[in-house]
Image (cartoon, rainbow, N blue to C red):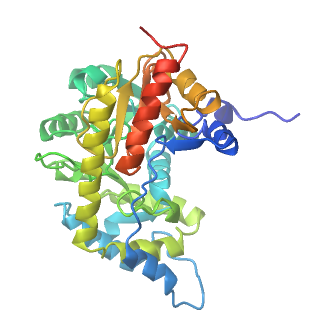
Amino acid sequence: MPTISQRGLVMPASPIRKLVPLANAAVARGVKVYRLNIGQPDIPTPEVGLDAMRHLDRKILEYSPSEGLLSLRLKMKDYYSRFGIDVEAEDIIVTTGGSEAVLFAFLATLDPGDEIIMPEPAYANYMAFAVCAGAKIVTVPSTIEDGFALPPIEKFEALITPRTKGVLICNPNNPTGYLYTREEMERLRDLVARHDLYLFSDEVYREYCYTELPYVSAFHLEGIDDKVVMLDSVSKRYSECGIRVGALVSKNRELRATVLKMCQARLSPPLLGQLVAEASIDAPAEYMSATYEEYVERRNFLIDGLNRIPGCYTPVPMGAFYTVARLPVDDAEAFCRWCLSEFDYEGRTVFMAPAAGFYSTPGMGLDEVRVAYVLEKHELADALLVLEKALEAYPGRKA
C-alpha cells in the first residue's frame, strides 16, 4: 500500500471538529446536542448581504482578480479606517477565508525548519498551517490563573533562534477571549523591531471588545509597518462563515508580491462570497451594535453560570465569543467524549472543544475546554444545566 506523507501523519486533528461523529451519533439517537464547540454564530447574516445574493444580476459568474475585487478592497479600506487602521486597497489581498490568509502568510515568509513564536493556548489550525509550510511553532504558555494575559516578553526573547521568523498573536484571542493591552502590544512591537521579525496578527474578532480600553491593532504600533501581517475574515462579524472571504493585509510590497503568486496559483477567491461581503460592509450600525450587545449579554450569562458550577472556573474574557474553562475532571477530552456517547440529561447533552488541542505543550489544558457562546441565552441556560448534571454523574470527576 502506498505510504502517507510525513506531513499528513503529523498534521493535528481539529479539537473543534474531531468529536463531530460522536455528536452526529447522539443526534441520531434522538439526543439534543448543545453545540458549544465551534465559533459558528447564530446571529442572522445582514440583510444587505443576503439581498446581494438574492438579487444577483450577472450573466456570467467569472473569475475575480487573484487579489480580489477592487470594489471590495476599496470598501475594506474604508472599513479598516473606522478602527484607525490606515491602509490602501493595494495593501489588501482577499483570500478564501481567514484560513487561507494564515496559510499564505506562512508559505510566503517561512522556509522548512523556520520558527514562529506564539502564546498558547492558540487557535488550533495555526499548527496545521505551520505543518503545511514545513515550519515549527514554538509556544509560550499563558495560564488560566493570569486570565491568559501575554506572558513576560523575556520568555519570548529566550526562544528566539536564528530560525525565528516571526511572532503570531490573535487579538482578541481565540480560544481564550483575552484582549491584549496597548502595553502588551508595545512590548511585542519592541521585540519584533529588535530582532527584525514579522508580527502576524489575527484580528478577526475586533468588533467584539468588552472593555473601555481601546482595541489595539498591530497597525496602530509605530515603526514596524513593513513587519506587520494582519489576518482577517468576514466570517464572524457578519455571520458569513460559509462564504469563505478573508484578507491578508500588509504594507510590505515584497511580501504582497509573493502572496499574489500563490493567489494566482489558486486562481481567485470566491466571487459570490466577495459580492456578499462587499454588500455586508454597508450593514447598518444598528446591526453591528445589536450583535455586540447580544454577545455581551451572552458572555455575562455564561461566565456567571460556569463559575457557579461546583469545581468549574473561567476568567472573564474581554473579547471574541469564547472562553476557556477549567473543569473538575482529569481528562477533558474523555469527559467531552463521554458527554456525547454515554450521557444525556432529559434527552440533552453538550458538545465542547477539549482545550488540550489548543496547546502544543504536552500535558497542558488537560482539564480545560473551550466554550463558544454562540447560542441564545435560553439555550445557554439549558446547556449549563446539562453540563452541571454531567459533571455530577461523570465517573472521572475530580474531588
Residue shown at 22%/53% (left/top)?
A: 219
310 lies above or below 344: above
- Residue 207 visible: no
Q: Give residue 184's position: percent from left, percent from top.
A: 17, 35
Residue shown at 20%/63% (left/top)?
A: 86
Residue at the outermost right position: 1
Q: Give residue 261's position: percent from left, percent from top.
A: 52, 61
Q: In which quarter of the image is the N terminus?
A: top right
In the displayed structure, does residue 224 sit left or right of residue 327? Answer: left
Q: Give residue 378's position: percent from left, percent from top.
A: 38, 48
- Residue 131 visible: yes
In the displayed structure, does residue 235 sit left or right of residue 145? Answer: right
Number of numbered markers: 0
Decide which of 300, 131 is in the foreground and name it.
Answer: 300
Residue at the outermost front position: 346
Which quadrant of the structure image shows residue 18?
top right
141 lies above or below 204: above
155 lies above or below 57: above
Decide which of 252, 146 is in the foreground and name it.
Answer: 146
Decide which of 178, 168 is in the foreground and name it.
Answer: 178
Q: Give residue 286's position: percent from left, percent from top.
A: 23, 70
Q: In which quarter of the image is the C terminus?
A: top left
357 lies above or below 234: above
Residue shown at 44%/10% (left/top)?
A: 398
In the displayed structure, does residue 343 sit left or right of residue 273? Answer: right
